């Protein structure tokens, strides 16, 4: 298996940098991806990034990652709180799976307090802004070293 990390970005993340910067910051998705990619490269990984506003596209990407990617780092956006189908897909992936959020869902609206993905990922990193992606990469590296 390659040392590829699938970086998945869910609905509305294509609007990062302009949508609610007081919550999500002013960094664009492209900037997050570039930073994550550079850090991953320095650790010996490649990154394949996919952003979609459609749940089915994200599920298809998880299926395609099976047997191809070492890990999945996913910011599913609002699908985090509602997508049992995405959780089922992630459950079939045997590599490291890290859920990422720029904001802290537990400190926001009540509907954001539950993650449908939490039970099928190795861990969740939330509330650290752009640093959340750095911490997710560190988690992948450490989990990968233990396999």
Image (cartoon, rainbow, N blue to C red):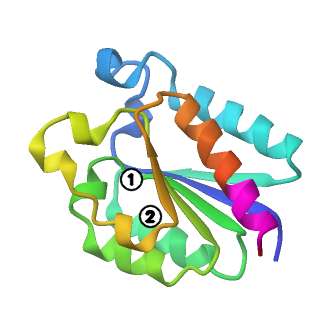
Is 28 a magenta residue? Answer: no
Q: Which residues are magenta?
A: 140-146
Residue that appears at 89% across and 52% down: 44
Q: Horizontal and vertical percent for residue 31?
A: 61, 26
Where residue 146 sits, quadrant-wise, is: bottom right
| Relative side of 16 to 32, left or right | left
Residue at which label 1 appears: 76
Where residue 3 sits, quadrant-wise, is: bottom right
**Of callouts 2 and 1, the N-terminal one:** 2
At mark 2, the secondary structure is: helix
Residue that appears at 49% across and 59% down: 123
Q: Horizontal and vertical percent for residue 98?
A: 53, 58
In this picture, is 76 found above or below 147? above
Q: Alpha-carbon distance for marks 2 and 1?
A: 9 Å
Of 15 and 69, which appears nearest the observer?
Answer: 69
Q: Are marks 2 and 1 in contact (CB under 8 Å)?
A: yes
Residue at which label 2 appears: 58
Of 128 and 46, which appears nearest the observer?
Answer: 128
| Relative side of 51 to 54, left or right | right
Q: Is most of the magenta stretch helix, strand or loop?
A: helix
In this picture, is 17 found above or below 90? above
Q: Residues within 10 Å of mark 2 (few under 14, many from 20)?
A: many
Q: Is residue 133 visible?
A: yes
């Amino acid at each position: 298996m390659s040392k590829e990390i699938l970086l998945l970005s869910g609905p509305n993340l294509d609007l990062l940098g302009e949508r609610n910067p007081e919550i999500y910051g002013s960094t664009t998705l492209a900037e997050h991806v570039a930073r994550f990619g550079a850090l991953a490269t320095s650790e010996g990984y490649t990154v394949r990034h996919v952003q979609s506003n459609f749940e089915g596209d994200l599920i298809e990407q998880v299926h395609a990652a099976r047997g191809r990617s070492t890990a999945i780092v996913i910011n599913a956006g609002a699908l985090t709180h509602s997508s049992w189908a995405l959780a089922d897909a992630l459950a079939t992936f045997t590599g490291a799976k890290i859920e990422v959020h720029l904001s802290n869902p537990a400190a926001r609206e009540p509907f954001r307090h539950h993650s449908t993905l939490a039970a099928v990922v190795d861990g969740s990193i939330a509330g650290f802004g752009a640093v959340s992606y750095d911490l997710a990469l560190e988690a992948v590296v450490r989990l990968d070293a233990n396999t």
